[in-house]
Amino acid sequence: MAANLLMLVLLIGGIVLAYNIKKEVFPYFDMDMVRITVPYPGASPQEVEQGILLAIEEAVVGLEGADEVRSTAREGFGTVTVDMIEGENLQKLAQDIRNEMDRIVSFPEDIEEPTIAIISRKRYVVSLALYGDQSEWVLREYAEYIRDRLLQEQDITQVEVISARNHEIDVEIPANTLRSYSLTLDDVAQRIRRASVELPGGAIRTQSGDILVRMKERRDFGPEFAQIPIITASDGSQILLDDIAIIKDGFEETTVSSSYNGKPAVMLDVYRVGDQTPISVSDAARQVVKEVNVSLPQGLRVDLRNDRSNVYRQRLGLLMKNGLIGLALVFILLALFLEPRLAFWVSLGIPVSFLGSLFLLNISYVSINMISMFAFIVTLGIVVDDAIIVGENIYYHQQRGKTWPKAAVTGAREIAMPITFAILTNMVAFVPMFFVPGFMGKIFKQIPMVVISVFAISLIESFFILPAHIGRKRTDAPSGLFGWIFHAQQSFGRAFLKFVNQRYGPFLKATIQWRYLTMATGIAIILVTIGYIKSGRMGFELFPKIESDYAKVTAVLPFGAAFEKARQVEKKLIQAAQEVTSKNGDKELVEGIFSSIHDNTIEIRAYLTPPDVRPLSTADVTRRWREQVGVIPGLEYIKFESDAGGPGRGAAMSVELSHQKMDLLERASADMAKALSFYPNTKDIDDGFSPGKQQIDFKIKPEARSLGLEAREVARQVRHAFYGAEVLRQQRGRNEVKVLVRLPRQERISEYNLEEMVLQTPKGTEILLRDAVYISRGRSYTDINRRNGQRIVTITADVSPRSQAGQILSSVEAEILPELQQKYPGLAYSFEGRQADQKESMQSLFRGLLMAMIVIYAMLAVPLNSYIQPLIIMIAIPFGIVGALIGHLIMGYSLSILSMFGVVALSGVVVNDALVLIDFANRRRQAGMAPLEAIQASGLHRFRPIILTTLTTFGGLAPMIFETSRQARFLIPMALSLGFGVVFATLITLILVPSFYMAIEDVKRLLIKNGTEK
């Protein structure tokens, strides 16, 4: 009764919790970073570095909790990112940074308000492309309408309009007009600012109530500024703004454009927040798109693209399918080796453990996502190991003549201690994953949380639920179909026992007799494996490459290149994509092509049809696209990506050079990129430098000073003329609108305009700019990157295959980098990006594995009451690693960090069979058997449960191991390590462990003999 009640609580409670638990594609986590952004409109990267970055770096370095400080200076703004030391208080660090920022008094006057924000990872769901042959204003207005409509949906909270220019009101006044009225741009800006006021004046407290007083001269749209008086004569006549200026209510002057399927477009990105699920957000967005398309004017349309909920559905379906197939395989194997009814009760432990674990996972804030679902599949075959051993031992005692109730009690009690410690070693083996640092640790810590929760419930189920059900098993023989199945299983069982006694028994006896040859063979296998790994033939990569649902190309022109040149490159890239599409299925391959230009960067995305529909993989599409494009002259850099947005994205290798002198860094990075180009399997090499815009520098002449002009006043007049004098910023609906006063565009598009510019002196006289300043020419940098106070440049390259990146890096470190350091004294280097993540993760895993080995040893020593026997059991661990390597070779996978996760987890799983084997031998010795007879009897008696646990573990993982879907490549390496590792370790357990057991007995006898002789 109590067992059934406990089982129902776990099952029903788990089902209820399964509906309420959060669902997402990837687990959400904090980035542990604080970012400071300081806009400095019109400033060059050098000015941003000198005026902003150095001051901020000095203020935040050394703060409690701050780890690494990275900063970037670009044209018009600077950013500083502070990484937090793991385990510190992120909110406190952000507040400390705010306090330090408030103390800085050396910032330039023209910077805008700095923003300090904790970096959070937005949970993207889907994009909406609004496109058509309409003006930018119309597109933007309808984009705002669609955003408002989306936000009306209960399941949608966050929507962003991207690839669109910001609103701006420009007041353009010709220079001659200004001179004729003795005005400057700053004069006009101040008068507009004073006239555009919305200010509360308090309240009049009358007997009938309060009356609010308010100045309401706010102006939201361009035409509303036209009637502002700029000059008022003594007779009352006025010169209005409309009389001297052209007022444009439009968009900021930036080289930003976007198109979809060749038509002007605006993209909207939809995100989810809180407990919203990808599916609910996507469904709501689809419904809005369906409604909006009906009401849009002729020529406008909205398409839904890059729907991440489809990825969630696909991966959920994939994992559910593999899980159900694995469950079926486990049941079939159990039914084959045990009685079907017994197999049913043992298999029932899987749903009981899975659903029961949700009680623990719910309070641990674990969501249902791709990682946690994979963790359930990992445990699918392992979780029944304890139930198999308990059930098989009960079955063994029943076969020896005991009644089912008595066999259940005796069998469970006899195996209780080794099973408990076996489950605990399983848990300990997964613990190192908790301590993997960085974002990788934040993602994969869900695996041990799920696994440990499932194992904990499974232990309860094996000792309190399973024996109670087996103990009440009916004694009468089944009839009909079940009777036929029962007799077939019994026949198989007898044939299997015959094989064990007649085939395995003599073989085990021979290996024990020739135990030192057996041991030497095992050691030789390990040495050969180590040599193969060290040779570099195996290769290693951080993550397997996972194909995205869109192909992407990014092309970068020299900074300051004409917008028309960017248009030409965009056209060529789109035409090449269309050529590939037309030759390979057209609409069956590509759903749409989105293009965007931002300054000197062109980005094209070809959104592909679902994986089961498209005739080509994303990698093939990208490769053919690259071939079709060929060479585009004049590009600084071009990169094709088939894995954009995936965990394996990014360059295969990154080398960071640092030095205080930028010109030296530029030359060193060019030499480095050139050296990398000689490696045949490198591509998409980026030296990290791009020539910046041409720059004209001024220094004031004595003549100008004699007229009362100072450098600050000259700089301000030039800035107002070409960038603009900012009047105000105010909110218009959801958008911030900036109002600028400046010269008309035709008066600021050539150097001639600069040379002929007239400056106003404080005395009211005029002087040409060229007569007031010395002029020199140069070139600014596109950006300046810094890390921990040092200027840096990062050289990146892709490698094909990526698993060979390690070999190239070793060659670079041994040959190229020492030459560069000799050529450029003071140059330092480090490996960042994927290499840094890989090194950090591997070091953490190895430290965790070492600690896990120590704990596993201690846990094995307790039930065995021996210091030596745990070492015999742990011999299975290195052979499990050999099996993992063989599995990767057979299936054609390189080693990755996920493979290492599997190896770490394997270390706890593979010792279970050896523990039960040694424990049984020790019991036989306590009953009076000789060591040789005891270990042989143990091998024969435990052969069936050892083989069965191995087959169920491999069977549970087999659907994932042999999965051909591209979506599963991310997780397959861990399944390979566990599945093949357990199989190979089982062979070692059945063959090598008895030989080592007897070898220890030989040593004991030798020591006793020597002691007796003395």
Image (cartoon, rainbow, N blue to C red):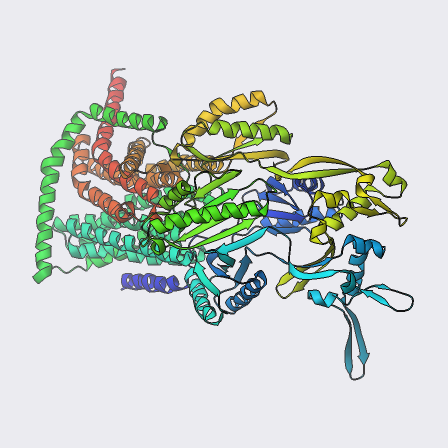
**Which residue corresponds to the image point at 71% horizontal and 49% vertical from the top-left?**
748
On screen, residue 978 versus residue 749, left or right, reads: left
Quick one: 804 or 332, which is closer to the camera? 804
Residue 782, how many percent across, how many down? 61, 40
Tell me: 215 left or right of 690. Answer: right
Residue at image point 33% right, 61% down: 10
Where's the C terminus, which quadrant?
A: top left
Q: Is residue 535 visible?
A: yes
- Image location of residue 301, percent across then percent down: 47, 64
- Count every numbered label the image shows and give the total: 0
Please say if 6 is above or below 207: above
Residue farthest toward the top in the current orientation of the protein: 1014
Q: Is residue 249 above or below residue 84?
A: below
Task: Name, please, the residue furthest toward the bottom.
Answer: 208
937 and 843: which is toward the camera: 843
- The spot of residue 720 in percent (x, y) is 75, 50
Q: Is residue 949 above or below residue 191?
A: above
Image position of 584 (left or right of 762):
left
Where residue 695 sits, quadrant-wise, is: top right
113 sits to left or right of 449 = right
Residue 444 vs 260, above or below: the answer is above
- Quadrant holding the N terminus: bottom left
- 511 or 463, which is in the foreground? 511
Q: Is residue 645 visible?
A: no
Tell me residue 732's x, y (percent): 65, 65
Q: Nearer the viewer, residue 476 or 146?
A: 146
